[in-house]
Amino acid sequence: MSDRAAAWLAWSLVLMSVVLLVGGLSFALMTRSGVPERPYDGLVTLAVLALAFSMVGAIIASRQPRNAIGWLFCGVGVTIGFSAFAGDYAEFWLASGFGRGVLVETAAWFSSWSWTLLAYVPTSFLLLLFPDGRLPSPRWRPVAWCAVLGLIGFLAGYTLEAGPLEDFPRIMNPYGVDSLILEAVALAGAILASASMVASAISLIVRMRRAGRVQRQQIKWLAYGGALAVGAVFVGGAISVWIGEVGYALTSIGLLGVPIFTGVAITKYRLYEIDIVINRTLVYGALTAALVAVYFGGVAALQALFRAFTGQEQQPQLAIVVSTLAIAVLFDPLRRRIQSFIDRRFYRSKYDARKTLEAFSAKLRDETDLEALSDELAGVVTETMQPAHVSIWLRPDEVPSRDAQAL
């Protein structure tokens, strides 16, 4: 396939995803028009994720048509669009009764299991193929085949299970089969798929150990995006217990890290800034957690003291004011301490080099012995840059010209 044909196909898949999302949103709006209290959080999350995967996939596929990850992301975007369209169409039929029964049952059936593709395919195959879209070596082909066979086996048992559909209890599975063999196939597929996911993660570690500088930076971007996604899902799930909208929004934003940071890594856009991004994330993430703990701890402590001395249950505004002032005072010194700790713990070599250069700069202002200064400079270069050999050449004084000697 030529580069132009690949670009046309990739952006056509993006257009297909958009059309499916718009169609599903239309059915959802018609269904929810009679039930105004039903939330729209899931619709927004699916639409944002579908567009993110589709757009990033199209950018990768149009620039690197032979990289399988671009086409994988395009497929994920189209699958999300089909899943949203099918599920919203089935809900519309259940609410209005408008449509053909067989078509609606098939749509509900597809919507009930398509989430498996979204959860398994990007995770397993992205780790196995990142960043160039190829296996680390031919020895990893059995892992790829195990991933495919495990997914097929699990889907065969899950999609053909007899009884009502999980997401649509009023609709019976139109393709359900009562068989003990299917249960065994589903169990074997789940075990095989789980093992292949673990092996895919190991393959990324092996690839990083053998990688050069560029691939190491790419893998750092992927790891950073995955860490953000996991953290956002965990924090968003906890927040959604109290504030559902905020929790769902945080989860969807975090999941966007997977396609976005993968696209940054593969296209090598601002590739070498990942260390700065990780450093700032660690510093300000720890700082935010510490300040939140100080704020709520201060409010709770002052409220308890106020209740003990006055016997009143109402929270005084003084507790909030004092906690806010404490945060303002602690922000800068706490940030410096956290930055110093992270530099010492995670960026030890750079931290030591900076400290060595600072000490040399201080000594440079007071040192007058040229020989001692030369030895000190050689020691600083050896400690910070660790070269195989260090030598210092000092330019001799200029030799007077013949005219000057004659005079």
Image (spheres, rainbow, N blue to C red):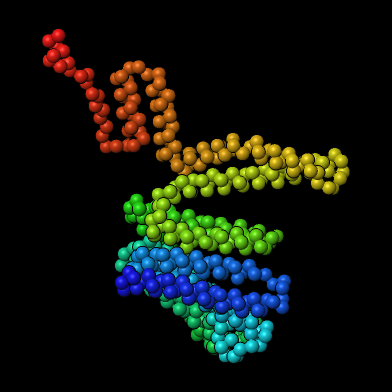
Q: Quadrant of the C terminus?
A: top left
Q: Residue at x 47, y 43 (%)?
A: 346
Indicate the position of residue 143 as horizontal and vertical percent values.
38, 69
Indicate the position of residue 405 as horizontal and vertical percent values.
14, 11
Q: Which of 3 and 297 is in front in this view?
A: 3
Q: Residue furthest top?
A: 407
Q: Residue at x 41, y 39 (%)?
A: 349
Q: Nearer the viewer, residue 307 or 104?
A: 104
Q: Can residue 315 be seen in this view?
A: yes
Classify 207 as above or below 344.
Answer: below
Q: Nearer the viewer, residue 65 or 358?
A: 65
**In the visual, does 370 lie left or right of 318?**
left
Q: Nearer the viewer, residue 250 or 238?
A: 250
Indicate the position of residue 263 as horizontal and vertical percent values.
43, 60
Q: Can residue 135 be seen in this view?
A: no
Q: Residue furthest right?
A: 311
Indicate the position of residue 382 as horizontal and vertical percent values.
32, 33
Q: Residue at x 40, y 31 (%)?
A: 357
